[in-house]
């Protein structure tokens, strides 16, 4: 049985006090806290196993290489990828999307083509395509959302013409927590001959995601949002697509051979096998070890339990927020439609005020655009406060959050 | 000879908040926050106090919300430079 109080014992930071109050960490959509199992894995790696990976013969390198490759295997298993050839380690979701933009988009998109994104995307799934469109001359189109923050599927369907070569869609909105039916989108996109990139930054840490079931062509996610260290993330891509893609960065590790011809004075270069072809330079080996520990931790909890716990917390928070007459909640009010993210504002305060006041109660939330300015423009709001939950949050913490919000309201 | 105090003695960070409001967030240095808060309260006009932990202030046409935790928001400041000038007047 899932027990958040038992889970909390694994997170040393949750014992902290901030501004003389016990820490309540509700900024999980930005980054998650780390269990001691992840911290210990990192410590053990650097204390006992640190070496560079691949192409060395000594024992330490062999051990580090095995750990690094096991991390790929764990990530592949976690999302249902066929093999580690489909798992490229990157710095995070942003780098994964940029990798697709420059390794696939740069060579496959041309004037007349279209990339379809949605208005609820994080800037990381907008800006790389806007930058590349200026280089390659294709068009970026934006599928609209409904007033409640859900995707307008009919509008998206109408925009998905044969000109669209790639659909970029977030699985879960980082602002509203809305879960998109990416499987439906992938099926529709494939019918039109387009590929599908799913931003899984807010879904993979919080629910079971199976790339075979979704049938997406690319899936990007970050380690630090799922209990892992910062600086490590994953790009999943179908093997046949990765095989045809050009490398992103050049350098060590991604090379099979660099052969100099003294007659022509040129180099002939061949790439390493997958996934190493896309992992230039010394990778974040420690980060990979930490990510592996994080995935093992989440797998042991069970992703269905993780999702159920967050859904339960979200449902409770949405119900209790109704007691706050000056709080405006954005997005769907049905917890089943979303992950544990609640955007809101308090009448009479801007979002930064709310975040700073809650900070004085030891409650950490985020304020601003959350790197999703177009979505805020759609909602016609200057910014929002955002509370986001994870496995270690409890109903008691939500009670304290509500009481603090009531005190803010009373101060008006 | 005493060195002239500078802003860095009191300020840990100045951040431009994201959002249309264009607020500037000030983080006072923890060990100097009480001294800094007292200086600011003496020089700016106190418009409203909430439970002794939040102070709504006015200074040269700008609204400032100061928190006893050592943080402040300067509302609608043009940029960080203007915020620094205001803080210099209030703190030095």
Image (cartoon, coloured by chain):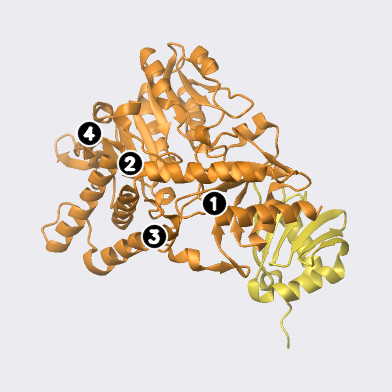
| Disc marking residue A84 | none
Chain letter tied to yellow:
B
Mark pair 3, 1: CA separation: 16 Å
Chain of residue at mark 4: A
Residue A125's place in the image compared with A12, above or below, is above
Tell me the distance, in whole angstroms, between the alpha carbons under discs 2 and 1. Answer: 32 Å
Disc with the residue nearer the chain's start (4 vs 2): 4
Secondary structure at numbered mark 1: loop
What residue sits right under mark 1 in the picture?
Answer: A27
Q: Quadrant of residue B9?
A: bottom right
Q: Earlier in the sequence, mark 4 or mark 3?
A: 3
Q: Which residue is mark 4?
A: A82
Q: Is residue A399 above or below residue A135?
A: below
Q: Colour of chain A?
A: orange
Q: Where residue A12 sits in the image (x, y, percent)? A: 44, 66
What subunit carries mark 1? A
Q: Earlier in the sequence, mark 3 or mark 1?
A: 1
């Amino acid at each position: 049985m899932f027990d958040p109080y038992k889970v909390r014992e694994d997170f040393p930071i949750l014992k902290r006090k901030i501004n003389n109050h016990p820490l309540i960490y509700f900024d999980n959509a930005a980054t998650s806290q780390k269990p001691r199992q992840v911290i210990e894995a990192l410590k053990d790696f650097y204390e006992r196993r640190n070496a560079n990976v691949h192409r060395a013969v000594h024992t330490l390198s062999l051990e580090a290489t095995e750990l690094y490759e096991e991390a790929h295997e764990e990530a592949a298993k976690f999302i249902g990828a066929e093999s580690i050839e489909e798992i490229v380690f990157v710095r995070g979701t942003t780098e994964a999307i940029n990798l697709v933009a420059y390794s696939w988009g740069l060579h496959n998109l041309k004037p007349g083509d279209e990339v379809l994104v949605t208005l609820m995307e994080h800037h990381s799934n907008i800006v790389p395509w806007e930058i590349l469109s200026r280089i390659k001359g294709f068009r970026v189109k934006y599928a609209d959302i409904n007033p409640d923050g859900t995707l307008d599927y009919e509008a998206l369907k109408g925009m998905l013409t044969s000109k669209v070569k790639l659909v970029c869609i977030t699985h879960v909105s980082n602002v509203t927590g809305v879960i998109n039916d990416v499987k439906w989108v992938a099926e529709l996109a494939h019918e039109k001959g387009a590929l599908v990139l799913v931003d899984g930054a807010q879904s993979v840490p919080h629910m079971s995601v199976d790339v075979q079931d979704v049938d997406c062509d690319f899936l990007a996610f970050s380690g630090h949002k799922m209990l892992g260290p910062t600086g490590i993330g994953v790009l999943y891509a179908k093997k046949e697509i990765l095989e045809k893609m050009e490398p992103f960065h050049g350098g060590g590790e991604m090379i099979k051979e660099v052969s100099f011809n003294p007659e022509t004075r040129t180099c002939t270069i061949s790439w390493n096998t997958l996934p190493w072809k896309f992992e230039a330079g010394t990778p974040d080996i420690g980060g990979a070890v930490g990510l592996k520990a994080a995935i093992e931790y989440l797998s042991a909890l069970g992703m269905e339990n993780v999702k159920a716990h967050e859904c339960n917390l979200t449902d409770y928070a949405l119900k209790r927020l109704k007691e706050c007459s000056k709080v405006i909640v954005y997005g769907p009010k049905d917890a089943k439609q979303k992950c544990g993210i609640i955007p809101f504002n308090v009448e009479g305060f801007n979002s930064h005020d709310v975040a700073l006041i809650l900070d004085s109660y030891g409650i950490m939330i985020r304020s601003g655009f959350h790197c999703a300015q177009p979505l805020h423009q759609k909602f016609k709001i200057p910014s929002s406060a955002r509370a986001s939950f994870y496995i270690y949050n409890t109903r008691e913490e939500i009670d304290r959050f509500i009481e603090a919000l009531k005190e803010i309201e009373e101060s008006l | 000879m005493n060195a002239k105090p500078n802003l860095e003695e009191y300020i840990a960070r100045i951040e431009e908040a994201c959002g249309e409001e264009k607020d500037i967030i000030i983080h006072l240095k923890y060990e100097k926050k009480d001294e800094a808060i007292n200086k600011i309260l003496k020089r700016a006009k106190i418009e409203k106090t909430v439970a002794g932990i939040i102070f709504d202030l006015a200074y040269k046409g700008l609204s400032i919300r100061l928190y006893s935790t050592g943080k402040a928001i300067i509302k609608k400041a043009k940029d960080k430079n203007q915020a620094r000038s205001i803080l210099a007047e209030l703190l030095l």
